[in-house]
Amino acid sequence: MLFKIKEIGDDGLSLDLPVKAPWLAAECPGLDAVPSTGGLKVRGQLLMTGDDVFLRGTLRGGLDTTCARCLERARVAVDVALTVTFRPRSEGQDAVDEEDEDEELDVALYDGDEVDLAPEVRDQILLAFPLKPLCREECLGLCSVCGGNRNQAPCDCEERQAASRTPLATVLGKLKI
Ligand SMILES: [Zn+2]
Ligand SMILES: [Zn+2]
């Protein structure tokens, strides 16, 4: 996701970049996800103002991952705005100056004659990704007793186990009627 400054003309440079599975695996290790069949794309424009490069675009599409409850496939929809200002790094500068930090605007530094969109795209993917992705909001998950997928085969193991643990059930269990 590197772009040469000289590629960005006076009218800007249009972007239409698919996020690919190998890139995702390399940039977001530990993220159990691949772009869904519809894809995940960065669309927008790079524009120059002086030495600043503006990215105005969107990151849209879907990621396929594993449902945190039932372990079946879950789809995470991604639709976020990308608004980043890249400033040339001055000599010895490690971080963005605080006065340049703006709550509305992301500021990043670039080196030499190219800007790298990868860290921004990676951050937005990680931010958009839920802690516990679900195949659907009302997913019933796996049964902790029989291990079955309760979306596909409802069972009452957990209820029965809970009932058998009540003091009354224990007493009743000992009585031979
Ligand atoms: Zn599920
Ligand atoms: Zn069960």
Image (cartoon, rainbow, N blue to C red):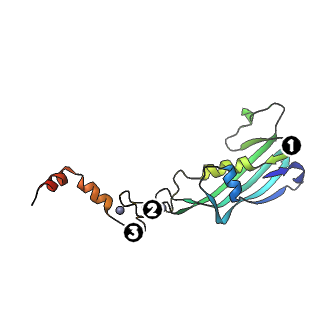
- Whether residue 106 sits left or right of residue 32 in the image: it is right
Q: Secondary structure at mark 1?
A: loop
Q: Secondary structure at mark 2?
A: loop
Looking at the rendering, in which quadrant would you find the C terminus? bottom left
How dense is the environment of label 3, judged by Cα within 10 Å: few (below 14), some, or many (20 and up)? few
From the top left corner, tell me how far across and down residue 92 is, in percent. Answer: 81, 30
Residue type pointed to by label 3 = Ala
Q: Residue furthest bottom?
A: 152
Residue nearer the viewer, 83 or 42: 42
From the top left corner, tell me how far across and down residue 12 is, in percent. Answer: 85, 55
Closer to the N terminus: mark 1 or mark 2? 1
Residue type pointed to by label 2 = Cys
Quarter of the image where one finds residue 74: bottom right
How dense is the environment of label 2, judged by Cα within 10 Å: few (below 14), some, or many (20 and up)? some
State the residue at coordinates (34%, 65%). 155
Q: Secondary structure at mark 3?
A: loop
From the top left corner, tell me how far across and down residue 76 is, in percent. Answer: 58, 59
Q: Which residue is mark 3?
A: 153
Closer to the N terminus: mark 3 or mark 1? 1
State the residue at coordinates (45%, 62%). 139
Image quarter where ligand 2 lies: bottom left
Label 1, label 2: how far apart the Cα atoms are: 50 Å
Q: Residue furthest top?
A: 92
Q: Which residue is mark 1?
A: 51
Ligand 1 under 8 Å from disc 2 Cβ: yes
State the residue at coordinates (87%, 56%). 11
State the residue at coordinates (67%, 41%). 103
Closer to the N terminus: mark 3 or mark 2? 2
Quarter of the image where one finds residue 9: bottom right
Residue type pointed to by label 1 = Asp
Task: Tell me the tag on residue 139.
Answer: 2
From the top left corner, tell me how far across and down residue 20 is, in percent. Answer: 71, 59
